[in-house]
Image (tube, rainbow, N blue to C red):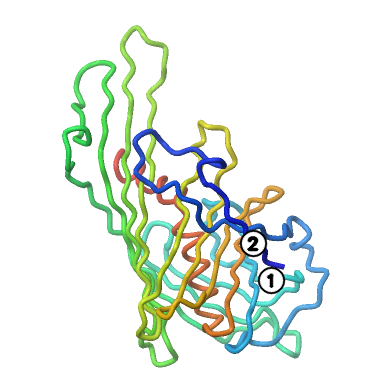
Amino acid sequence: TWVAQAVEPAARRSCPPGSTAARAPCCFFSVPAMGGTICGGVQAPRTDTPMQGKPHHFVVVVGDVTDSSPCYKIYDEAQCPWLNITQEGNIGNGKGSIFVSQAFTDNGQEGTEKLITATVSALDFKEMKADSPSDKTWLTSGEGKTIKKLWSLSRKVSLLDMGGFAFAELTVEFTGRAETQKPTKDSKQKLRRGAWVNSGVFKLNMAGQTCNVVNCLLHATPASGDDGLDEAYKVHQAEGDLAFQVAYKETAGLCEIHIIASATVLPMAALVLGFVMAHWLHPGRIETLAMAKVFG
């Protein structure tokens, strides 16, 4: 059962000083924790193909936010193995492709037919100019200085039909800042570095219609000691109907991506888009990439 539960992000997670990310109640959800039992494979696998016309609940289990495995298993809400996500290329740092296939066919063999294909563009990273004196990059010389840089990182995801034509496109742009604090000669403090996402803009066009993506991007920094890696998204169709919703949950040392597709949307499209949004576009991963881009 998927239970909607609005949660005030500021009560659950911290945001770096100066962040402009909104703190309004958003789209967190209470989802059933499947935990380590989902990996036991005790349930009989499903061999049906998800079809439009009824709602679907997909669960993708990943190691953590930095996991870059080439294949992920997809289960239903009853923990039955269902589908596989296979990836080609280096999606973590560059471009690549994503395919979905059946976990098993009716005769018990592993499925190989591609049910849907998605292409993921390379990362487009830029250092931004400051709009105000307080945002300008601070001097890099001298002792005890804080070096601050503003950045943006964007990429595009395209879903392809059987003819290779894109029927859905998602573009995302994150903006944030990176800082490094240089200790003085007399200080025993070590060099400190960090990068933070301040905002994320999601633009989704599906079947010729512009969808509205509501996201929660506030999560805890490692220094806060909080467990705030959970993220959530809602995607509404042009007429306002809910197309699908996504929740990224940390449970028992594993991370689960729950994707609920409504009966009005193509379930495979919701699955791939939800997986990419929650995993490959997770703010924690984006901040790590920004760190590498800014500081090398």
- Identify the mark at residue 61; answer none if there is no mark: 2
Q: Quadrant of residue 255?
A: bottom right
Disc 1/disc 2 C-alpha distance (Å): 8 Å
Q: Amino acid type of disc 1?
A: Tyr
At mark 1, the secondary structure is strand
Q: Tell whether 210 sits left or right of 254.
A: left
Location of residue 142 with respect to 289 vertically, above or below: above
Residue situated in front as seen by the camera: 159 or 53: 53
Q: Quadrant of the N terminus?
A: bottom right
* Residue 75 numbered mark, or none: 1
Above/below status of 11 relative to 67: above
Identify which amino acid the numbered label 2 is placed on.
Val
| Residue at 17%, 43% in the rendered image | 131
Residue ranking furthest to the right: 42
**Outermost residue, top side:** 186
Residue contact at pointers 1 and 2, CB within 8 angstroms: yes
114 over 224 or under it: above or below = below
* Viewer-proximal residue among 132 and 34: 132
> Is label 2 in a helix, a strand or a loop?
strand
